[in-house]
Amino acid sequence: MRRIIFLSSATLALAAVLARPTTTAAGQVLYVTDFDSNTVDTVPPGGGTASVFASGFSQPFAIAFDSAGNLYVANYANGTGGTVSEIRMGSSTVTTFATGFKGPAGLAFDSKGNLYVSNNNYTGTPNNAGTVSVVGPGGGAATTFATGLSTPEGLAFDSKGNLYIANQGDSSGTSVSVVGPGGGAATTFATGFNAPQGIAFDKAGNLYVANQAGSVSVVGPGGGVATTFATLPSGAGGLVFDSAGDLFVTQGNVGTVVEFGPGNGSSYTTYATGFTLGGASGLAFAPSAVPEPSSLVLLGLAGAALGVHGWLRRRRAA
């Protein structure tokens, strides 16, 4: 016997909403700070020439997204002052999110939405004692989270909530430190770098470090002495992985972003151009899955329609 199944219009509406893609192209766009032009630039999906997304910063250095897709920018301000700016999802308006820093040079969010900021504290000489500050999700004044650092810059969390900090120090060596979720004095995790700046973990838990002298280093989950992953003709600044495992690195001295394939440090391609010489610094991909506002509205309408449909059925049955 063949059965014919009738679906209500409300059910069909809900199915249409659920079948609709819930991601936007924002997850494919690369955002890059241009330190010298005081802008945040965007690179289209697949790479190409950068264009200005927002302006009005004060030596923008690091950049990070929160889980909601809001963008945060560290304003270095010559290493002696500095703020963190915020650009809300769907906007290009720049507002002040947090204050009280000394040369903010690294940004990272923990799983609870707290923002961590490295205070580079550079005053013209290397090896300045620096700190890491933390700001709650609502912004405002920062408090000290970690100490025992030397001109800190890049920040990254591992899967256990430990925070790793690049100690740039001077160009003759330096290290990456680690501090537990409770904060306090940092300890040495790895050595063998050459003025480290940006840092990021791959999916296997290996830590990659961009060295300003012109290379990328890698160190395993257990720490120790780093090895060279790749060399570059110009200084390396920020770095970030995409969801496919490709590694992207800024070369500020020549104003480009280069791309390495997963685990392949022997060759790279130029991914983006159009930055000022000496400008390209921090970089980040927007979250890859951001619900479209129209989808959320339709989902709510479909849910309401189902509720009305159920009420009418109960009324008829009575």
Image: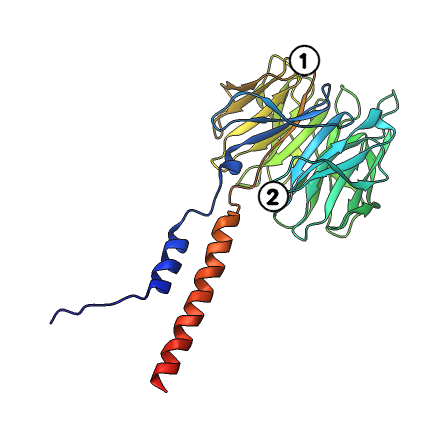
Q: Could you tell me which secondary element the residue under label 2 belongs to?
A: loop
Say whether residue 226 is left or right of residue 168: left
The mark that comes first in sequence, 1 or 2, is 2
Residue 233, image x, y percentages: 60, 12
Q: Nearer the viewer, residue 119 or 288?
A: 288
Q: Quadrant of residue 168?
A: top right
Say whether residue 249 is left or right of residue 295: right
- The structure residue drawn at horizontal position 62% and vertical position 42%, both measured from the top left corner, is 89
Please determine whether, in this image, residue 128 is positioned above or below residue 300: above
- Kindly tell me whether residue 36 is visible in this rendering: yes
Residue 277 image label: 1
Residue 283, image x, y percentages: 63, 30
Q: Amino acid at mark 2?
A: Gly
Q: Quadrant of residue 307?
A: bottom left
The crowding category of the residue bearing disc 1, from other C-alpha atoms within 10 Å (few below 14, some 14 to 19, many at least 20), is some
Please determine whether, in this image, residue 143 is positioned above or below residue 57: below
Residue 215, image x, y percentages: 62, 20
Q: Amino acid at mark 1?
A: Leu
Residue 246 image label: none
The residue to which callout 2 is attached is 69
Colour pattern: rainbow
Say whether residue 24 is left or right of residue 191: left
- Kindly tell me whether residue 189 is visible in this rendering: no
Q: Could you tell me which secondary element the residue under label 1 belongs to?
A: loop
Q: Nearer the viewer, residue 78 or 120?
A: 78
- The structure residue drawn at horizontal position 50% and vertical position 23%, both measured from the top left corner, is 47
For marks 1 and 2, give the CA distance: 29 Å
